[in-house]
Image (spheres, grey):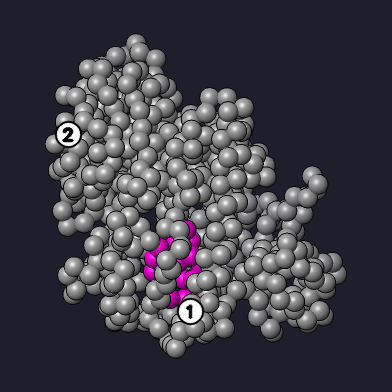
């Protein structure tokens, strides 16, 4: 819901021209939706595995697969160094499981602790894992492209290093023995939006192909059996769902729905109260992913990897239940921090709407939660946000989240260039970044960031339109249409879930779960009502009045009965 400070955004319909090539799609609604998301050919809706681009397009893939092959054949240690989020956990589980299935005898993993080791292959991680023997190999997954000091420290300690990552590189690359990253300079691979687990999947595909050539009679695992991990990591990392990522996610979801998910993923779905046979990408994003991520935020992501690698249902349920408990704790900590952040912004002399960027911090915030706080404040105020918490060595660790059109990592780079030494470390993407700085420069950083962001902001960024797919006719507001939309994904970042708008009369309403509004609404041309849910909105509307609702049409299942309902994101008086 919109914050009082924000200028009400316009609700506009997506302009769509349906190309003749989509005429074979029988549903005019789906033609409209796909065309509105840039689909021009039916091939872009083919999610079969035969269409996957070949791994040979990845720069450095031959050297990387050879490194792993040599380490395996020589009986050397292969240490997988992951990241403490869901993408890092799924990447770690996938590489460890596949290497073992392909015959590697000495595979282990290490997941950095957010507070003790920091992000990625840091010198602190190298100190923790100890020295390597000649031939031993570290494989980073979902990290490493920014680990210049860590890679050098690992090599001094006797390790060879293979960096497998998807993050944007800085000006310099680590001097690893091999780098596989579709975003590194000189890499022409089409899959620039792959998550860390997607790049890891491709690395394992290259290793498998190499082994198949050298040992044609060797029984090797099927890579498709691991696509449930790829789907979870890809969706949870909120990377852009381009055609390649939609293929990977679609195939992973198919495995899960057919009851072929690994025990850990099945248990996470179960503790989240979701139906595996109907799981969609949104279920991963809002239910499965957060339970995995909670471990890395508050505890140790090794719990998440243990869940994903569980071999039986009993041990999977035990670790999934532990993750669910940690997630409830995370929610509690987040509510407290959110309240304190809101109060801090209300106490400022200049309102958030008068600022180009927002910076919040507190001495007792948890560094694993600040990214969630920054995201929520960004959504509420429509401004780039950086939230800080105390980190290691007396420094502050910050999480930055940006608005559409403003590249936050580039903004931090500009601050760093104009004020050398102000920021100790930074890195990230267009919409999210991390940074470290000293507590005594927070005010100076805030001024520098606001000045930098102010030069880049436009009116369109500050009040973006709410772009919808138009209105649904009264006969389309039914379960059949809701099922059609659900089956036509996967929807997600860059391939947005269909969003509609229309006028509805409020027939009845009540608050549920203290913070959510449940409605019965009626389309002006309908005789029947349809249920609607407005999350995190505890203000009652005027019964009998007509409002313009922006909504998704979803399938609701209650006591084994299916119905269509509206998930409302914006309410406007007519």
Residue in the picture at 28% in, 41% down: 125
| Relative side of 139 to 98, left or right | left
Where residue 82 sits in the image (x, y, percent)? 35, 40
- How many numbered discs, if any? 2
Tell me if I can see residue 442 in this picture. yes
Residue 385 covered by magenta stretch:
yes
Q: Kindly state the secondary structure of the residue where label 1 is placed.
A: helix
Q: Quadrant of residue 395?
A: bottom left
Q: Quadrant of the N terminus?
A: bottom right
Q: Residues within 10 Å of mark 1 (few under 14, many from 20)?
A: some
Residue holding disc 1? 345
Q: Is residue 554 above or below residue 206?
A: below
Q: Earlier in the sequence, mark 1 or mark 2?
A: 2
Left/right placement of residue 550 relative to residue 381 reads right
Of the pair 230 and 213, the residue shown nearer to us: 230
Q: Which residues are magenta?
A: 369-389
Picture quadrant where residue 51 is located = top left
Number of the label disc, if any, that sits on residue 157: 2
The residue lying at 74 percent from left, 57 percent from top is 564
Assign the C terminus to one quadrant of the image. Answer: bottom right
Residue 422's x, y, as percent? 22, 70
Vertical order, 478 against 206 (above or below): below
């Amino acid at each position: 819901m919109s914050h009082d400070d924000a200028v009400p955004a316009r609700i506009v319909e997506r302009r769509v021209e349906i190309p003749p090539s989509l005429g074979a799609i029988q549903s005019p609604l789906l033609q409209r939706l796909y065309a509105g998301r840039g689909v021009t050919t039916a091939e872009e809706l083919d999610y079969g595995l035969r269409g996957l681009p070949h791994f040979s397009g990845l720069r450095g893939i031959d050297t990387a697969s050879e490194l792993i092959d040599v380490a395996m054949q020589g009986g050397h240690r292969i240490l997988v160094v992951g990241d403490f989020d869901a993408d890092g956990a799924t990447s770690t589980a996938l590489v460890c499981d596949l290497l073992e299935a392909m015959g590697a005898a000495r595979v282990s993993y290490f997941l950095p602790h957010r507070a003790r080791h920091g992000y990625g292959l840091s010198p602190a991680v190298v100190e923790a894992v100890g020295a390597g023997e000649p031939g031993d190999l570290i494989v980073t997954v979902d990290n490493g492209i920014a680990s210049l000091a860590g890679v050098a420290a690992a090599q001094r300690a006797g390790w060879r290093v293979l960096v497998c990552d998807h993050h944007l590189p800085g000006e310099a690359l680590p001097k690893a023995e091999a780098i596989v990253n579709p975003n590194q300079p000189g890499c022409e691979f089409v899959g620039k939006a792959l998550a860390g687990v997607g790049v890891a999947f491709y690395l394992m595909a290259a290793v498998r192909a190499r082994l198949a050539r050298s040992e044609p009679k060797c029984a090797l695992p099927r890579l498709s059996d691991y696509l449930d991990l790829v789907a979870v990591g890809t969706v949870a990392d909120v990377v852009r769902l381009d055609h390649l990522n939609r293929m990977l996610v679609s195939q992973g979801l198919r495995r899960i729905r057919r009851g072929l998910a690994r025990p850990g993923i099945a248990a996470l779905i179960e503790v989240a109260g979701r139906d595996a046979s109907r799981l969609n990408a949104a279920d991963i994003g809002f239910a499965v992913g957060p339970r995995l991520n909670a471990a890395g935020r508050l505890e140790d992501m090794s719990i998440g990897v243990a869940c994903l690698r569980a071999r039986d249902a009993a041990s999977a349920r035990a670790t999934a239940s532990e993750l669910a408990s940690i997630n409830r704790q995370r929610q509690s900590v987040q509510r407290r921090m959110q309240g304190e952040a809101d109060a801090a912004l209300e106490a400022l002399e200049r309102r958030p709407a008068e600022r180009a960027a927002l910076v919040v911090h507190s001495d007792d915030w948890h560094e694993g939660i600040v990214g969630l706080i920054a995201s929520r404040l960004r959504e509420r105020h429509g401004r780039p946000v950086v939230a800080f918490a105390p980190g290691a060595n007396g420094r502050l660790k910050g999480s930055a989240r940006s608005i559409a059109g403003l590249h936050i990592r580039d903004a931090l780079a500009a601050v760093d260039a104009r004020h050398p030494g102000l920021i100790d470390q930074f890195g990230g993407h267009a919409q999210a970044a991390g940074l470290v700085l000293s507590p005594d420069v927070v005010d100076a950083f805030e001024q520098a960031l606001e000045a930098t962001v102010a030069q880049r902001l436009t009116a369109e960024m500050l009040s973006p339109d709410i772009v919808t797919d138009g209105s649904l006719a009264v006969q389309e507001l039914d379960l059949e249409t809701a099922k059609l939309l659900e089956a036509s994904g996967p929807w997600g970042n860059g391939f947005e879930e269909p969003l509609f708008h229309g006028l509805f009369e409020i027939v009845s309403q009540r608050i549920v779960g203290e913070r959510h509004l449940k409605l019965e609404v009626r389309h002006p041309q309908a005789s029947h009502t349809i249920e609607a849910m407005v999350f995190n909105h505890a203000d009652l509307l005027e019964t009998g009045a007509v409002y313009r609702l922006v909504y998704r049409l979803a399938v609701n299942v209650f006591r084994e009965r299916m119905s269509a309902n509206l998930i409302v994101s914006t309410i406007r008086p007519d």
